[in-house]
Amino acid sequence: MARPRTEMIAKTRAKLIAAGRHAFGRIGYAEASMDDFTGEAGLTRGALYHHFGDKKGLLQAVIMEIDAEMTERLNKVSASAPTRWQGFVDECAAYIEMALEPEIQRIMFRDGPAVLGDISQWQNTPGCIAALSHSLDRLKADGEIIDIDTETAARLINGASSHMALWIANAEKPETVSKRAVAGFRTMLEGLRK
Amino acid sequence: MARPRTEMIAKTRAKLIAAGRHAFGRIGYAEASMDDFTGEAGLTRGALYHHFGDKKGLLQAVIMEIDAEMTERLNKVSASAPTRWQGFVDECAAYIEMALEPEIQRIMFRDGPAVLGDISQWQNTPGCIAALSHSLDRLKADGEIIDIDTETAARLINGASSHMALWIANAEKPETVSKRAVAGFRTMLEGLRK
DNA sequence: GACACCTACATACGTGGCGTATGTAATCGA
DNA sequence: TCGATTACATACGCCACGTATGTAGGTGTC
């Protein structure tokens, strides 16, 4: 009990973020009520407004947490591939797959941008785009890809991925569409190669 | 006064859609109040709920109107180019430019998908994607592009375009970013060419 | 180690806005 | 011409966000 105070605060924040993440991910930002997750967290609205200011503040905290997790996952994927190009392709595929997870899709690609504006702007470039950008930088240094602005390419891929994910997720036959989407995506990526 | 009734109805609907379009485009879906645009249209909430059911219904009507306009603009652009490939590239550029217009960006790319789900799904494929898809079909028939599923490509381009637009619109120096974005986008499109 | 202070959270309330239920006048079919 | 339907107005309930105020427990200072 070196820091019982700060410890409790961290726990409270974590509980609220977790509850918010559940609610936002399952029923969406607009439908989620403040009382929903304070109840789930065993707290009251006082704690929520004290720590996060308002509903948007909680959403932002949730997004930062998810972004950090996505970044780590992407880095792991690209690190465990035999070649850099393969790592990059795997990373893109992993990005699409993550965008298929309902929680990520809803919070990061639907409600997030709608409520807070363009996510990729409202702080420093978020980790998941930075990760793609970094991979492209290395490929460029190795001379494996054509001359293209890497941040732009990362954002192109980001945009394409998230839309592919939405398309797949909302399709009647997700598996069929998924094959088409991934195949087309790979073809597009090949166009970047020398 | 052949059909004074239906005429008046159409006028009422048009007034409400126009008012909704203004409000949604300027302050966004969540911040726009029903009373805002009924006031602007010189009507009451009764008319609104009668014709559109709820707030989402009005948004949907607004989106359909904008989509039709976008489709027409895109078709004009591609039709007035010297070659098909050039027409296609122009069409993509026009798409990005349209996505830069605040009203289109907000309604079609931010609030629309957030409120109604994936726009490209909740009816038949919307016109603006169909237009891109159609252009790609012709290019493919002419043997100008590589073998790729055209609908997938259209959606990739759609996703990439809208994200480029968001990036540009929210940047500190839109002009600089715009140049980078369009250049990168063209490079990516070249990858589709034979 | 006692005291004042501050911070983390709880409680209670006002308010705004969505949706609905009901009312009414004008138009359409017979 | 008369009943029925439709287009819209009016009035109300309710939910949920945010805020203002209260309180208890920890913290810095002497």
Image (tube, coloured by chain):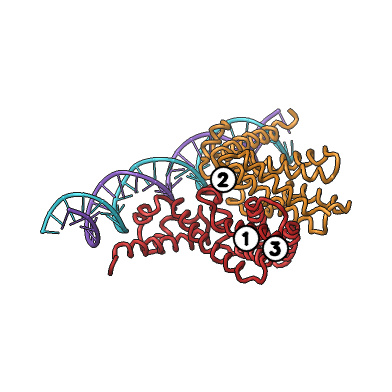
Chain colours: A orange, B red, C purple, D cyan
Marks 1/3: CA distance? Answer: 34 Å
The one nearer the camera, B121 or A18, is B121
Q: Is residue B55 above or below residue A45?
A: below
Which amino acid type corresponds to the residue marked 3 in the rendered image?
Answer: Glu
Instruction: Give above or below for D29 relative to A119.
Output: above
Q: Secondary structure at mark 2?
A: helix
| Picture quarter with the C terminus of chain B | bottom right
In front of the other: C9 or D15: D15
Question: Are the two marked residues, 1 and 3, in contact with CB atoms closer than 8 angstroms?
Answer: no
Q: Are marks 1 and 3 on the same chain?
A: yes
The percent position of residue B14, horizontal first and vertical second, equals 41, 63
Q: Earlier in the sequence, mark 1 or mark 3?
A: 1
Which image quarter is the N terminus of chain B in? bottom left
Q: Amino acid at mark 2?
A: Lys
The residue at which mark 2 appears reads as A55
Percent position of residue B103, x then y = 55, 62
Look at mark 3 in the image and give the residue it sits on.
B172
Please, what is the three-letter code of the amino acid marked with disc 1? Answer: Ser
Q: CA distance from mark 2 to mark 3?
A: 26 Å
Q: Which is more foreground, mark 1 or mark 2?
A: 1
The location of residue C21, given as percent across then percent down, is: 29, 44
* Residue position marked by numbered label 1 in the rendering: B135
**Gap between marks 1 and 2, in whole Å?**
43 Å
Q: Marks 2 and 3: same chain?
A: no
